């Protein structure tokens, strides 16, 4: 190019675009143009002026400069192409009519236009703190889901097998849950109480005996324990004080109650007779079958009656103070035996401690007790006068023949007779006989002569009544 030639604005703009293209090619990307590039290119119509040809006479390569052989596009002084003088630095102001594009903008243009360029630097989207929080959130969500599944049991079956569970009266919800867990009815007492709290059933669970299943869902157990049972049809059965096993059995047969009462009252695991001092030879539970009125579910079962009688006896007899009897070297079984004789002889509450005192005094003096009630029990004669043969019966229950107490109780004594046997009246009486027209009362005597007079008065009254008992007039 000849010295002193100046470029127009169009030529400078075209040179700038060319420079940008070359830089893009060196960076590995296609040409980058400004928004005004098409317009600038369109306005560049004139061709560059040609350089004058160099002759061979000059002795120089026509493609090199006159002085240093550099590119003909470069100037002599600065060694720079005058076309690129004003655009060498990216930070220089761009010519008028164009828009400056920074390096970052060029990179973004290359990325959005799909042209190859420098890859974007990867950014870390999550920090370690966010990852830890996310993990904790997952663990918490899993824990909540597990808790709800254990509490609500959406996939739990209805249970299997059968188990009878008795809920004691006044049991708390926690105590009921512990009992059910021990019996295998539920999986967890904690979740059972949580479910009961959620359902509002903690205070609605009822005492009683329930037929439940093993591994039942909490909802089914709560339904069973909070639903009032249907009223069962029951019957009242009264066992009279002083009745024997044989008489009770006859009453039950008359009431058409099925079962064998005599067989059911020979032995029972519900009571330990040896703990009361009873001998091993005791043939039955006579005396331990407490007389009372029992409410039994229909149809009445003999086993239920016997069970209630024995349980009631242990409860009631356990309240008796036996210290006086023990001071006389008497066992609880002895007291019960004396009580049965008192029950069989005394017809009034007033006479019971007096009859008991006669038994204590005769035992003290080593006398035969001579209690008619024992002879009647031994012979089975409870209604007619005793015969001489019956009075001489060798039964171990006949106190007219055998000294001391009979083999065991002769009936079912009530609490009044038991208390009288444990606390006899302090008297010197050794005899008693029924008082004529005494309505069951007896006359007591301290010596045999007095007893003879009272006995004669009784026989005279009996004869006057044609041989009938003169006790009630």
Image (cartoon, rainbow, N blue to C red):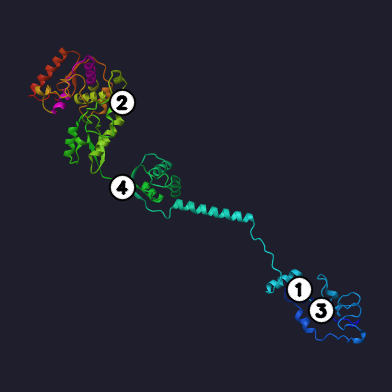
Residue position for label 1: 26
- Secondary structure of the residue carrying tag 3 is helix
Which range of residues does the magenta coloring cover? 354-381
Query: In front: mark 1 or mark 2?
Result: 1
- Secondary structure of the residue carrying tag 2 is loop
- Secondary structure of the residue carrying tag 4 is loop
Q: Quadrant of the C terminus?
A: top left
- Secondary structure of the residue carrying tag 1 is helix
Q: CA distance from mark 2 to mark 4?
A: 38 Å
Residue 154 image position (x, y, % from top left):
43, 55
Left or right position of 321 against 361 = right
Residue position for label 4: 230
Residue position for label 2: 320
Q: Tell me, yes or no, whether the two marked residues, 2 and 4, touch with CB atoms within 8 Å.
A: no
Residue position for label 3: 15
Query: In front: mark 2 or mark 4?
Result: 2
**Mark number for residue 88?**
none
Residue 58 is one of the magenta-drawn residues: no
Q: CA distance from mark 3 to mark 4?
A: 107 Å
In this view, 161 is above or below 282: below
């Amino acid at each position: 190019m000849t010295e002193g030639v100046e470029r127009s604005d169009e030529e400078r703009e075209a040179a700038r675009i060319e420079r940008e293209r070359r830089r893009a090619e060196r960076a590995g990307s296609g040409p980058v143009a400004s928004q005004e590039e098409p317009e600038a290119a369109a306005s560049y119509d004139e061709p560059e002026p040609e350089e004058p040809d160099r002759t061979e006479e000059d002795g120089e390569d026509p493609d090199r400069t006159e002085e240093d052989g550099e590119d003909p596009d470069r100037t002599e002084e600065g060694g720079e192409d005058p076309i690129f003088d004003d655009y060498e630095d990216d930070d220089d102001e761009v010519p008028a009519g164009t828009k400056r594009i920074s390096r970052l903008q060029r990179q973004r243009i290359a990325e959005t236009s799909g042209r190859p360029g420098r890859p974007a630097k990867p950014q870390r989207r999550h920090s370690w703190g966010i990852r830890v929080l996310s993990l904790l959130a997952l663990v918490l969500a899993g824990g909540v889901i597990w808790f709800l599944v254990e509490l609500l049991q959406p996939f739990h079956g209805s249970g299997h097998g059968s188990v009878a569970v008795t809920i004691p009266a006044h049991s708390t919800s926690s105590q009921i849950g512990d009992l059910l867990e021990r019996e295998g009815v539920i999986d967890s007492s904690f979740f059972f109480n949580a479910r009961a709290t959620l359902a509002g059933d903690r205070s609605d669970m009822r005492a009683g005996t329930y037929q439940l299943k093993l591994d039942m869902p909490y909802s089914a157990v709560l339904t069973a324990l909070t639903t009032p049972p249907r009223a069962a049809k029951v019957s009242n059965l009264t066992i009279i004080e002083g009745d024997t096993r044989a008489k009770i059995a006859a009453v039950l047969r008359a009431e058409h109650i099925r079962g064998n009462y005599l067989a059911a009252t020979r032995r029972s695991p519900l009571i330990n007779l040896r703990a009361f001092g009873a001998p091993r030879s005791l043939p039955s539970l006579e005396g331990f079958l407490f007389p009372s009125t029992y409410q039994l579910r229909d149809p009445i079962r003999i086993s239920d009656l016997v069970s209630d009688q024995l349980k009631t006896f242990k409860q009631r007899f356990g309240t008796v103070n036996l210290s006086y009897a023990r001071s006389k070297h008497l066992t609880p079984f002895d007291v019960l035996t004396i009580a049965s004789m008192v029950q069989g002889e005394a017809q009034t509450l007033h006479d019971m401690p007096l009859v008991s005192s006669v038994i204590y005094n005769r035992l003290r003096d080593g006398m035969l007790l001579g209690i008619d009630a024992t002879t009647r029990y031994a012979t089975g004669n409870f209604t007619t006068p005793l015969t001489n043969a019956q009075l001489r019966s060798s039964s171990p229950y006949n106190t007219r023949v055998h000294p001391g107490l009979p083999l065991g109780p002769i009936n079912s004594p009530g609490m009044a007779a038991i208390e009288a046997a444990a606390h006899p009246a302090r008297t010197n009486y050794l005899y008693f006989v029924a008082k004529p027209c005494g309505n069951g009362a007896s006359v007591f005597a301290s010596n045999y002569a007095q007893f003879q007079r009272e006995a004669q008065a009784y026989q005279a009254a009996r004869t006057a009544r044609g041989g009938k008992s003169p006790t009630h007039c």
